[in-house]
């Protein structure tokens, strides 16, 4: 009791695929591995550039910053306290 669909599927399983597709799985996995390695290298370069940028920022901020002014009792500059700003001094 074979219908045309069963007969067609049986014939389809007997066919061999094109020879160009024989090595496609190996090529796909090789490409995936290569892209994973490239992403890893990109992450390392990105982390190094962030570390260098932080180091430059810290060095430049500490060397070029003006000397610290004496702070008031609350730990802020007394000239910028809300009471002095409201009085207009």
Image: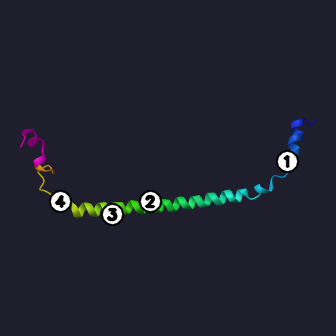
Whole-angstrom CA distance, mark 2 to mark 4, is 32 Å
Mark identifier at residue 55: 3
> Judging from the image, what secondary structure is the residue with disc 2 in?
helix
Label 2 vs 4, first from the N-terminus: 2
Q: Quadrant of the C terminus?
A: top left
Label 3 vs 1, first from the N-terminus: 1
Q: Position of residue 64 (x, y in %)?
A: 22, 62
| Quarter of the rendering containing residue 22 | bottom right
- The residue at which mark 1 appears reads as 13
In the picture, measured across the screen, residue 76 lies left or right of residue 38, that is: left
- The residue at which mark 4 appears reads as 66
Whole-angstrom CA distance, mark 3 to mark 1, is 64 Å
In the picture, measured across the screen, residue 49 lies left or right of residue 81, that is: right
Camera-side mark, 1 or 4: 4
Confirm whether the magenta stretch covers residue 12.
no
Q: Quadrant of the N terminus?
A: top right
Q: Which residues are magenta?
A: 79-89
- The residue at which mark 2 appears reads as 46
Task: State whether residue 21 is above or below residue 83.
Answer: below
Task: State whether residue 87 is above or below residue 35.
Answer: above
Whole-angstrom CA distance, mark 1 to mark 4, is 81 Å
Camera-side mark, 1 or 2: 2
Q: Position of residue 49 (x, y in %)?
A: 40, 61
Whole-angstrom CA distance, mark 1 to mark 2, is 50 Å
């Amino acid at each position: 009791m074979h219908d045309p669909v069963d007969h067609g599927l049986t014939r389809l399983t007997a066919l061999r695929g094109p020879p160009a597709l024989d090595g496609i799985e190996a090529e796909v996995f090789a490409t995936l591995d290569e892209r994973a390695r490239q992403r890893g290298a990109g992450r390392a370069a990105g982390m190094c550039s962030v570390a260098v940028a932080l180091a430059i920022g810290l060095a430049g901020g500490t060397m070029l910053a003006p000397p610290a002014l004496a702070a008031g009792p609350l730990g802020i500059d007394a000239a910028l306290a809300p009471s002095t700003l409201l009085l207009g001094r």
